Amino acid sequence: MKLKVNGETREIDLPPDTPLLWALRDGLGLTGSKIGCGMALYGACTVHLDGAAVRACVTPPLSAVGEREVLTIEGLSADGSFAAAGTACVDFETVEFVAKLAALRAHTP
């Protein structure tokens, strides 16, 4: 199955019913989006799906994501500096804050 993540189309070998968060973390090694409550309460798993901030823990599985564009916390900085500095130390609230702020900036002139 193919998944478009952070501007690249990547091949992923996971069942189509795999939740997006697990596909990103386990299938692609993108661990910036955190596993928190699993019920979309905290926002640690926030990613962009076609420009909208969504909670990846409850986002429809890979089969429903299809060719839509996924942007993770790692993809939010053009040069990767945020991911390099932040993936290991970003706390749960930071992921949600940065993802929502980026979505707001993208949709506000």
Image (cartoon, rainbow, N blue to C red):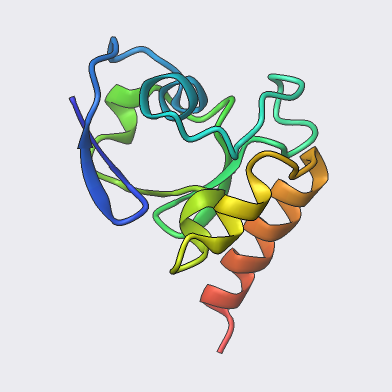
* Displayed quadrant of residue 51: bottom left
- Does residue 55 appear to the left or right of 71 in the view shown? right
Q: Residue at x 25, y 35 (%)?
A: 66
- Pick the front one: 65 or 82: 82
Quarter of the image with the C terminus is bottom right
Q: Nearer the viewer, residue 75 or 43?
A: 75
Residue 61: % across, % down: 39, 22
Determine the residue positioned at 65% across, 54% down: 85
The single residue placed furthest to the bottom in the displayed view is 109
Nearest the camera: 109 or 87? Answer: 87
In which quadrant of the rendered image does the N terminus lie? top left
Q: Check the image and report above or below for 36 versus 93.
A: above
Left or right of 35 in this view: 59: left
How many numbered circles does the render carry? Answer: 0
Image position of 78 with respect to 3: above or below: below
Where residue 57 sits, quadrant-wise, is top right
Residue depicted at x 28% and y 23%: 63
Q: Position of residue 14 (x, y in %)?
A: 29, 13
Front-lying residue, 82 or 8: 82
At 68% from the left edge and 39% from the top edge, which residue is drawn? 88
Side of 48 where 33 appears, left or right: right
Q: Position of residue 3 (x, y in %)?
A: 26, 36
Residue 19 position (above or below residue 85): above
